[in-house]
Amino acid sequence: MTFAARRRSVRLLAVARFASTGGSQAAQIALAYTVYERTSSAAWVSASLIASAGIVGLIGPISGRLSDRFDRRRVMVSTEIAGAIGWLAVLMAGSTTMLILTALIATASNAPFRAASSASIPNLVAPDQLSWANGAVATAVNASMIVGPLVGGTLVGAAGPRAVFGLNVASFLMSALLIWRIPGEFSEARSSAPRGAGPSWRDVLRDRRKVGLFAVNALTFASFGIILVADLPLVDHFNGGAVGYMLLTTLWGIGAVLGSTSATRLTVHREYHALVIGTAAMAISIGSIAFMPNLFGAIAVGTLGGIGSGLAFTPWFSLLQRATADSQRGTAFAMADTFEQSSFIAGMIVAGWAVGFLGPRTVYLLPAALLLVAMTIALRQGSAKPATVMVKSPSAGSSAKMNVSP
C-alpha cells in the first residue's frame, strides 16, 4: 500500500474505535442509570458495570486464541456484529436480571475485538509509522471516553435508556462496516498447514520485557480503580457537586486526548522515555491532589495527570507490538486486558476501605505510590539490553528488525 493508503486505513480504524467505544460508554451509563432507578442498590450498579465492562478481562484466553488463529479483520467484524445483536437483546430485555445478563453476554461476545484491533495495527503501517498509528487510535478512544458518557447522560434524560441502547447497536454496526472496508491485511500470512491451538500464556510470559509491560499496565489500572472510587468523595469533601465531578473527570479525559495526540510524533527511540515520563506525570499529579486546598487545584493537577496518561499509553501499545511476533500478538494483548481489568477491579475493592481509612484526599497517595512503582519498572525496562523482533513492513512485504529500547 502507499503511504496515503496506510494512513487512511488507520484513520478508518480510529473512527471505528471511536464509534464502538463511544457507543459502549454511553450504553454503560444508561445501563447503570436504569439498574439504579429500578433497584436503588449500589451492588446492582456494580454488577451492571462488571457485566458491561469488567467481563472483558475474563474472556482473555478466548480473545487471544481467536485473534492469533483466525483472520483478524473477520474476528473484528464478527465480534462487532455479535455486540450489536447482544445490545439489541439488552434493548428488549424486561427484568433487571435480564438486563444485566444480556449486557454480560453482549460484552463477552464483543471482547475479542480489543485484542484483535491492537494486534492488527503493525500490519497496517510501516514500522516507523507505528507511534503515529497508535496515537491516532488512542486519541479517538480517549475522545470517545468523553463524548460517550456525555451523549449517554443527555439521551437518557431526553429519550430514555432504550434510545441509548439502540444507539450502541448502531455504533457497533457502523464500526463493523468501516473495518470491513479498511484496505490492507490485518494479520501476517500464515502457512497453509493446519494451525495448532496458538501460543499459550506461558509462551508469552517467558519474555521478561513483556512481563514488565504487563506489570506497568496492571499497576496503572489498579491506581485508576482507586481514583474512580475516590473522586466522588473528594468532590463531596470540597462541596463541588455534579458540576465539580463533571469537570474533574472530563478535564482528565481532555488531557488524555492532548497527551495521546502529542505522542503521535514519537520516534522509536523515545517510546520508553515517554512511557516513563507519562507515568511519572500521573504519579506526581495524582499524589498532589492530597495536598490541594480546594477542588480547583485538584482539577488542575488532575488535568496534567490526564496528559501524562495519554503520553504514556500510546508508546506502551507500540512497545508491546514491537516486542511481540505477529503470531503471538493477539494473545499478548488479550493477556494485557485480563491483567488490566483484574487490577482495575482490585483497585476499586481496595478503595472502598482506603477512602474511609485514609480520608478523601490522603487516599490519592496510594495510587500515586502504585504509579511510582510502575514508573520504576518502566525505567528498568528501558535501560535493559535492547530486544529485537521482526516487524513486517506492509509496504515492502518483508520484515524489518526493530529495537524496542531507546
Image: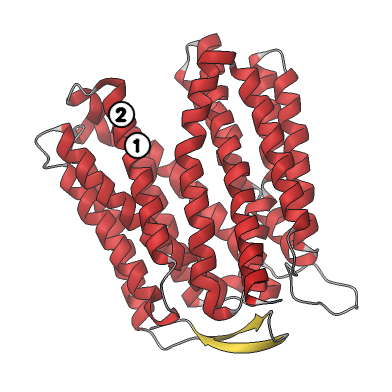
Mark 1 → mark 2, Cα distance in angstroms: 6 Å
Quarter residue 162 falls in: top right
Compared to residue 229, the image places residue 133 above or below, namely: below
> Label for residue 191?
none
- State the residue position of label 1: 249
Residue under numbered circle 2: 245
Q: Which amino acid is tagged 1?
A: Thr
Q: Secondary structure at mark 1?
A: helix
Q: Is residue 73 above or below residue 86?
A: below
Q: Residue furthest right?
A: 193
Residue farthest to the left, as pictured: 293
Helix, strand or loop at label 2? It is helix
Residue plotted at (47% across, 11% down): 40
Crowding near pointer 1: few (<14 within 10 Å), some, many (20+)? some
Residue 230 figure quarter: top left
Drawn side of residue 147 relative to residue 252, left or right: right
Q: Are marks 1 and 2 in contact (CB under 8 Å)?
A: yes
Residue at position x 80%, y 64% from top? 71
